[in-house]
Amino acid sequence: MSATVVVIGAGLAGLNAARILHRHNVEVKVLEAGDRVGGRVATERFHGYLLDHGFQVINPQYAELQDTGIVKDLEIQNIPKGVEVIGERSTILVGDFRQDLRFIRDSISPKSGTIREKLKFLRYLIRNSEDISFGAAMQDCGRLYSEVLEPFLTGVVLSDPSEISNRMARELIHWFLRGNPGVPRGGVARLPELLARELSIQLSTTVRKIESTRVTTTAGKLDCDAVIIATDPISASLLLGKTPPHMNSSVTYYHAIDEGEIESSYLRVRKNSPVINSVVISNSAKDYAPAGKSLVATTTLAPLQRDELNGELKLIWHRDARR
């Protein structure tokens, strides 16, 4: 067998690379070790529930996504552009008040930071600055950072946001303000399924060896002019004979409640909690739960014991989550 270009990995990066090549009339073959496309962007169906592999949202305003021409087909079900921050004595709701005027009260309240801090943050958003850490850039934003930005961004970057690039943090916040993230009808797996249309993809095929013009797989050898490695960093390192990097990870727990038991559609976060966020995803995307039920998605950076998780969810939602 032969192909002009072989793409290893049918995750979003591999599918998009293959799609661009195919659009320019380049013969391309995608090899995927798994039994489906999408990599980490996957959805399981379980007794009428849609369970994404981790809490994932898609921002339809991303330039790369707009270029694919599939945004309308995704049928994005938007999640409100706000966050409920659970404190010891009160809950504050902050977000983009251009979308909902209910965000104004707590967004200007001292509970979410001083006016001076918020003005400094607005200045930060509109001005370019040196690429220092986000924590250093936010050193004058005190309570606004500790009470709102830090717990929210922890769930976005899956690590300590104070240590990430200042420019990356600004870009993430800009995209959040420009777009309206959500989940596709049918789950996040819909995205790679649409990207895979019209592509030649060989599933359940593991690459064993890469040479300059040949790829050896569990299904045989494939000659080509070029190879694109679009796997996860660990698999790519092993293919290239390099030491695999350390990867951040998260765990998402799902539990069902009766429909209407929790009316909030907002992402909830609680400072200094092992739970980085929790959301009743089916309140925004009705197809994620069967009739009469709601689906709660709760994300942590490390596995929790059942009792510890339930205790945290009681503090966040003020309800038992044992079901």
Image (cartoon, rainbow, N blue to C red):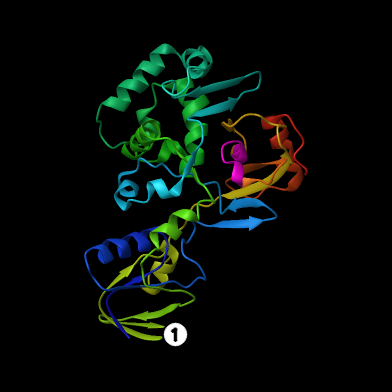
Q: Was residue 132 drawn as part of the magenta stretch in this picture?
A: no
Coordinates of residue 33 in the picture (x, y in percent): 47, 73
For this rendering, which residue is in front, 101 or 276? 101
Q: Is residue 229 above or below residue 41?
A: below
Rendered location of residue 136, percent (x, y): 37, 31
Does the image show residue 275?
no
Label 1 CA crowd tier, 10 Å (few <14, some 14–19, many 20+): few
Observer able to see residue 12 = yes
Residue in front for this viewpoint, 302 or 133: 302
Whole-percent x and y of residue 234?
44, 65
Left or right, 263 with respect to 306, comes to left
Three-letter amino acid code at disc 1?
A: Ala
Residue at image position (72%, 48%) is: 305
Pick the residue in front: 130 or 227: 227
- Quadrant of the image containing the C terminus: top right
Say which quadrant the N terminus sits in. bottom left
Would you say residue 282 sits in the magenta stretch? yes
> Can you identify the residue that label 1 sits on?
219
Residue 263 lies in what quarter of the image?
top right
Which residue is pictured at 41% across the width and 41% down the height? 59
Residue 212 vs 102, above or below: the answer is below
Q: Is residue 313 above or below residue 202?
A: above
Q: How many marks?
A: 1
Q: Residue at x 63, y 57 (%)?
A: 45
31 left or right of 276 in image: left
Quadrant assignment, res 134: top left
Secondary-structure class at tag 1: loop
Residues rendered magenta in the picture: 278-287
